[in-house]
Amino acid sequence: MRAQTSLVSIFAAVAAAAFVLAAWNGGLAGPTSAPILADNRPNAVPVDTELVLAVDVSYSMDPEEQALQREGYIAGITSREFMQALRSGMHGKVAMTYFEWAGPGDQRIVMPWRLIEGPETADAAADAIARAPYRRAMYTSIASALQFAKPLFDASGYHGLRRVIDVSGDGTNNSGPLLVPVRDDVLAAGITINGLPIMLKRPLQSSLDIENLDIYYEDCVIGGPGAFVIPIRERDQFKEATRTKLVMEIAGRTPQPRVVPVQAKAPRVSCTVGEQMWRDRWGN
């Protein structure tokens, strides 16, 4: 019988891992000072965090995984722990938008920017996500998702102390621009990228999946102050892991940096492994 992973154990594991991940990410951990504020218009509403949820809907995500992924976010946004983290902020408010992505040019906003400042606004945001029809699309372009996400902050209508892109998905970048240059460009704007790699399936020779997707996310996707990865390996871990991740993002928990051996800064997996696998399979 699978043991139910507790919220405390997940949080402790993530906090420990984040100490390492925040200190190294190929030397691209982002600025140590406060993030650059993107929307500086006088009427922008001050919030603690501006959070972009970028959700994979490529064909590698089966319908059950899609449902679990969405249910995880809905449960996280409306959870007691999320509300407690929300109230602990300087402003007690966060702004959030939710979009789905697949290949290059395939990004759709499911929930435009919304202010969340209590249970009622959290319920309304969760309801907007729940009502959206499910869809699936071709290819996996994390880089294109990040390119789409970055300018969303520019006219969000909110003035955040932190800006975060939260990427969830079950595969590597296999189309569109190369991932690392796009990731670096996002980090240079003072935006933190966190990751939720979904690792429910055992990689098959006939698939484009890789065994160590969590390491790929650590080395090639995430970055910025306090960036972290929470891998999901069991279906019953979805809701709790997603809630933990949202709480950490909203609460702005940033671990203190620590010294990491130089050799640990080298990527442990090729950041172009997805493109290489695609070329090996299809020849282009």
Image (spheres, rainbow, N blue to C red):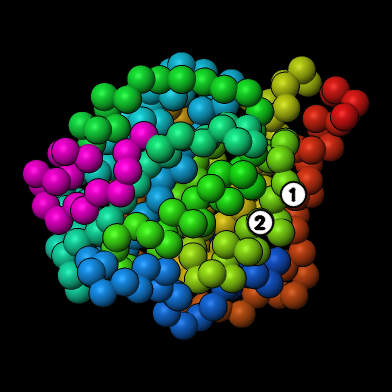
Residue drawn at (74%, 49%), measured in percent from left and top?
178
The one of 105 and 27 positioned closer to us in this rendering: 105
Mark 1 vs 2: CB contact within 8 A:
yes
Identify the image quadrant of the N terminus. top left
Q: Was residue 124 drawn as part of the magenta stretch in this picture?
A: yes
Q: Quadrant of residue 182?
A: bottom right
Q: Nearer the viewer, residue 175 or 228?
A: 175
Residue 278 in which image quadrant? top right
Using the rendered image of the protein, determine whether residue 162 is visible from the camera's viewpoint: no
Disc 2 packing (10 Å; few <14; some 14–19; many ≥20): some
Q: Position of residue 284 (x, y in %)?
A: 87, 29
Residue 8 vs residue 90: left or right?
Answer: right
Residue 26 place in picture, x, y as percent? 70, 66
The label on residue 178 is: 1
In the picture of the structure, the residue carrying the numbered disc 2 is: 182
> For the residue carrying disc 1, how many other residues have a C-alpha within 10 Å: few (<14), some (14-19), or many (20+)?
some
Residue type, mark 1 in image? Leu
Is 181 magenta? The answer is: no
